[in-house]
Amino acid sequence: MSTIDAIGEGVTAASAAETHGSFRNLAKAPHRLMRWLARCIERRRTRMSLLELTDEQLADIGISRCDAYREGIRRFYD
């Protein structure tokens, strides 16, 4: 086997390992997307709950009605 053949085989093996790693990352993408979406939905739910609190309840946790409204109208992905 010549040196050129050995170098060519090494590059091929490295390329195969790199490609396998990128497929692994691609396979994780739907799972990461679902986790992100679940976090967004949870944030939206808690922001909507904040808007349902009375002024007395908001005062108990130290938030004004204005602050609650400002938080409640934020986009779900913020």
Image (tube, grey):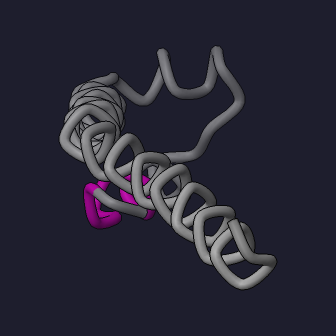
Inspect this view and state whether residue 47 appears. no
Give residue 73's position: percent from left, percent from top.
Answer: 28, 63
Inspect this view and state whether residue 19 appears. yes
Q: Quadrant of residue 55?
A: top left
Give residue 47's position: percent from left, percent from top.
Answer: 33, 38
Taking the image as shown, residue 70 lies to the left or right of residue 62, namely left
Residue found 72% across the figure and 84% down from its top: 4
Taking the image as shown, residue 9 lies to the left or right of residue 24, namely right
Which stretch did the figure color magenta? 69-76
Residue found 64% across the figure and 75% down from its top: 5
Rendered position, 8 above or below 50: below
Taking the image as shown, residue 15 lies to the left or right of residue 8, namely left
Residue found 25% across the figure and 32% down from its top: 31
Q: Which quadrant is home to the N terminus?
A: bottom right
Q: Nearer the viewer, residue 7 or 76?
A: 7
Q: Which quadrant is home to the C terminus?
A: bottom left
Taking the image as shown, residue 34 lies to the left or right of residue 62, namely left
Residue found 57% across the figure and 45% down from its top: 64
Q: Quadrant of residue 42?
A: top left
Q: Is residue 70 magenta?
A: yes
Rendered position, 59 above or below 76: above
Q: Is residue 49 magenta?
A: no
Give residue 15's position: percent from left, percent from top.
Answer: 53, 66
